[in-house]
Image (spheres, rainbow, N blue to C red):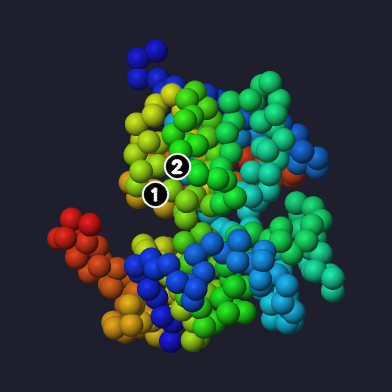
Amino acid sequence: MKGEKHLIYKKILFKADPFSYDLEFDDRITLVGGDSGTGKTVLYEILEDLRLTDEYKAIKLFNYKSDDIVTSIKQCRHNFIVVDNADILLDDDIKKFINFEFSNQYMLFSRNCDGLNVSDNSFKVLKLNDNRITLEEEL
Amino acid sequence: MIDIYTEKKESKDWILQNDLYFNLNTSNEDLSDEDIKLIKQIDGAKITPDKHIETKYGIGTIRNLSSGCKTLLNIVKHPEKVVCVEECGPNVLQVIFTMDDIKIYMSRPSLFAIPNDVKIRFNDTDVVTGGTGYQRWWSREYERREALDL
C-alpha cells in the first residue's frame, strides 16, 4: 500500500516466565530509551534464544561483544536488527546504512537520535505492568 | 566540581566501554554499603555477600546489572578516570550530578534534574553552575558546532 512502512515484524510476542512480552512497532527504526535498569539488556538476552526459532529467524543481534559490527551490519538485508549499547556502537557510517537500507527494520537500545531518520513514533520505553512487558511511547 | 569532557579520547585513563570495564575490573572490587544502596536505587537489585543479585527479572551475578548501574559504580570506584556516561538513563545521570570530584565524558546534553548549586567544568576551561548553566553551555556549544558545520 502506498505510504505504508515496510516492517519485518509489526509485533514480537513471546512468553519468558513470569513475563509475557508484547512488543509492537510503529516505525522502521525504534529507539528504546528511558531509565537505566528497565530491562533492555534482559530483553536482548531473551532475543538471543528467540532468534533461533523459525518465526523470528530474521532477528540479528549486535552488542559491544560483536566482532566487526560495521561489516556485519552492512551485510544484513531483510533483517530485524537489534543493537544493544547503541549509544557507544553506532558511528556515522552505520547510521547512514540504517537510514538508507530500507529492507531492514531496526530496534536500537539508545537515547541518541542524532544522525538517524526517525519519526515521532520511533521513541519508545519498556514498560512492565502485571508481568506484561510492552513498548510504550516515550514522553 | 564535576568535570565534563565533550570530545572523545582514547586513553588508559578513560573508560569508554563501561560494561567491559566493569565486568573485568570493578566487579572484582569490594562493595561498600553506599555502593549497595546505589545498586538498589538504580536497578532495584538486592545483593548478597557473594555478589549474586536478585531483581524483578531474576537471579544473577553482579555482571547482570544494567549498563547505567555499572557506569555509576565505575565512577564511584574510579573517580580518577574519565567515564563515558552516554549509556546512562536520566535516573543514573541525576545521581551522578549529585557527586563531587568526578570526571565524565558526554558528547551531547541530556534532559534530567541537575541541582542548582552543582559546579560543572567543561573541557578544563568553562565553569558553570547548576542546570541553567549546563543548558546555557550546551546551547552555545551547539551554536559553535553549527557555525563550524560539525
Q: Where the N terminus of chain B falls, by quadrant?
A: bottom left
Query: Which residue shows up at 50% across the image and 86% down it?
Result: B100
Please name whichever residue, A25 or B13, is drawn nearer the observer in this view of the structure: B13
- Write down the chain letter for disc 2: A
Residue B2 at what x, y percent from top left?
44, 82
10 Å crowding of disc 1: few (<14), some (14-19), many (20+): few
Query: Which residue shows up at 81% across the image and 56% down it?
Result: B59
Query: Which residue shows up at 49% across the image and 73% down it?
Result: B12
Query: Which residue shows up at 47% across the image and 25% down it?
Result: A77
Q: Sequence-wise, which precedes: disc 2 or disc 1?
A: 2
State whether residue B146 appears in this view: yes
State whether residue A125 appears in this view: no
Q: Which quadrant of the view contains residue A80?
A: top right
* Residue on which disc 1 sits: A91
Report the residue that reaches farthest toward the top: A1
B133 displayed left or right of A51: left
Report the residue that reaches farthest toward the left: B147
Please name whichever residue, B68 or A69, is drawn nearer the observer in this view of the structure: A69
Q: Secondary structure at mark 1?
A: loop
10 Å crowding of disc 2: few (<14), some (14-19), many (20+): some
Please name whichever residue, A76 or B143, is drawn nearer the observer in this view of the structure: A76
Decide: is B29 above or below A133. below
Kindly report which numbered mark, 2 or 1, lies closer to the viewer in this rendering: 2
B104 displayed left or right of B17: left
* Residue on which disc 2 sits: A70
